[in-house]
Image (cartoon, grey):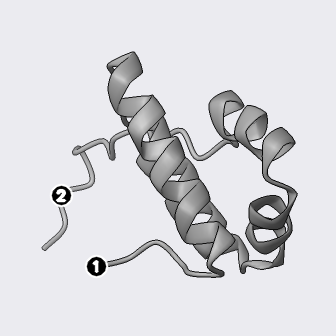
Amino acid sequence: MWDRRIKLPEVDDSLPGALLLGFLSNPQARDHYFALKEKSRKQYNIWINMAKRAETIRNRVEEALDLLEQGKELGLK
């Protein structure tokens, strides 16, 4: 059974600033992002926000913009 004393990890599902900056140069990706369901948007946000290194953040934002430009959700490759 679930132990109530275990705390769930806190997850930052806010819109990453790096992704917002990417939307400035890619309005098509922005439009697809905001057309997604909230759950799908949160998946993108959490995935990018979990990155710690600047290089990883940059790579994830680039990949996210490419996927969004194609109208795809984040998922298995």
Q: Give x and y (percent) for residue 13.
A: 59, 47
Classify mark 1: residues with Cα within 10 Å, few (<14), some (14-19) or many (20+): few
Horizontal arrangement in the rendering, residue 15 relative to residue 49 (left or right): right
Residue at point 85%, 40% (across, down): 24
Horizontal arrangement in the rendering, residue 73 relative to residue 41 (left or right): left
On screen, residue 34 above or below 46: below
Horizontal arrangement in the rendering, residue 71 relative to residue 44 (left or right): right
Instruction: Using the image, tell me which numbered label, if any, was put on residue 48.
Output: none
Classify mark 2: residues with Cα within 10 Å, few (<14), some (14-19) or many (20+): few
Q: Quadrant of the C terminus?
A: bottom left
Cβ atoms at labels 2 and 1 below 8 Å apart: no
Q: Quadrant of the N terminus?
A: bottom left
All told, the count of numbered labels is 2
Query: At label 1, which amino acid type do we have?
Result: Leu
Depth check: give the residue in front, 66 or 56.
Answer: 66
Query: At label 2, which amino acid type do we have?
Result: Asp
Depth check: give the residue in front, 40 or 56.
Answer: 56
Element type where label 2 sits in the image: loop
Element type where label 1 sits in the image: loop
Q: Give x and y (percent) for residue 74.
A: 46, 72
Q: Give x and y (percent) for residue 75.
A: 37, 77
Residue at point 32%, 19% (across, down): 53
Mark nearer the viewer, 2 or 1: 1
- Whole-Å distance between the Cαs marked 2 and 1? 31 Å
Quadrant of residue 27 within the rendered picture: bottom right
Depth check: give the residue in front, 7 or 15.
Answer: 15
Residue at image mark 2: 3
Q: Residue furthest left?
A: 1
Depth check: give the residue in front, 10 or 77.
Answer: 77
Residue at image mark 1: 76
Give the mark nearer the N terminus: 2 vs 1: 2
